[in-house]
Amino acid sequence: MAGQSAETWTLLRRIAHQQPVGADGRSLQGSNPNTVSRSITEIIRHPDYSSTTFQNDIALLMLSSPVSFNNYIAPVCVAAASSSFYSGTNTWVTGWGNTGSGVLPAPQTLQEVQVPIVGNRQCKCNYGASTITDNMVCAGLPEGGKDSCQGDSGGPLVIKQNDRWIQAGIVSFGEGCAQPNYPGVYTRVSQYQTWINTQITSNQPGFIAFTSTGTDSDLSVSCSGLQVVFTYSPRSFSLILQLWFVDVPD
């Protein structure tokens, strides 16, 4: 989002072995003077969303009233259609979901994790060519250990470019949490610039192109036999709409 306030729409739609972000309005327990709450007055789900393939796993939420930016609430730009995310590019994910597969209860303090982009060619070798599409982006470590997890669905995957934070992905699904060779899979926000603009007629989000530098190592990836995964899960337990504004590490 961009502008003077988060007046209308925000994007919707896992973080294992994470670390707490900190205080200042990031805890779900007790009261905090920095907390701002708004109800949702309208939800626009993508008409072609598939609960089977998790294709088009994105929705827009309309807030009941503007939210003013301050030291604890800051805007994030949206990745433009021309963005490029090369393999190895560092990203950050935040959420209140589980800290590992089957680890309960979920933390009450906002968690963060840094994970690198995994190119789509490599991700297709991991999950199968029919599972990963151009509308998705993957992030994680080949050895596992860091990931988003159940309960984080809908959270943002962001990238920093100069002094701007850009939302590149939305937590969607994965095979367990933080397993080797199974990175988290996110909705590739840049694929939806046109759709978002057709739904929001005023105060449109600020779209910024993220440009990776160097050479994308994913272009040289090949696999003799694509691995097929028969079971994978969304990273939410139920359709709970979560909205938060956070600062992430420099």
Image (tube, helix red, strand yellow):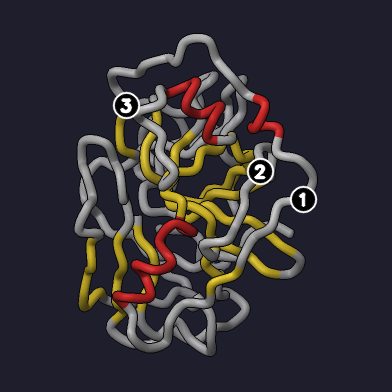
Q: Looking at the image, is mark 2 or mark 3 earlier in the sequence?
A: 2
Question: Marks 3 and 1, how far apart in space?
Answer: 32 Å
Residue type beneath disc 1? Thr
Please indicate whether residue 29 sits to the left or right of residue 113 in the image. left
CB within 8 Å, label 2 to label 1: yes
Q: Residue 200 versus residue 42: which sits nearer the camera?
A: 200
Number of the front mark, 3 or 1:
1
Q: Looking at the image, is mark 2 or mark 1 earlier in the sequence?
A: 2
Question: Marks 2 and 1, how far apart in space?
Answer: 8 Å
Considering only vertical position in the picture, is 68 above or below 81? below
Give the x, y percent position of residue 12.
35, 60
How crowded pointer 1 is (Cα within 10 Å; few <14, some 14-19, many 20+) is rated as few
How crowded pointer 2 is (Cα within 10 Å; few <14, some 14-19, many 20+) is rated as many
Number of the front mark, 2 or 3:
2
Mark number displayed over residue 213: 1
In the orientation shown, which residue stands out farthest toward the right? 214
How crowded pointer 3 is (Cα within 10 Å; few <14, some 14-19, many 20+) is rated as few
Mark 2 lies on a secondary structure that is: loop
Mark number displayed over residue 232: 3
Mark 3 lies on a secondary structure that is: loop
Q: Which residue is drawn at 52% across and 52% down?
A: 157
Q: In which quarter of the image is residue 118?
A: top right
In the orientation shown, which residue stands out farthest toward the top? 224
Please indicate whether residue 218 sits to the left or right of residue 241 in the image. right
Q: Mark 2 points at which residue?
A: 86
Give the x, y percent position of residue 147.
52, 35
Q: Which residue is drawn at 54% across and 19% down?
A: 180
Q: In which quarter of the image is residue 229?
A: top left
Considering only vertical position in the picture, is 35 above or below 246? below
Residue type beneath disc 3? Tyr
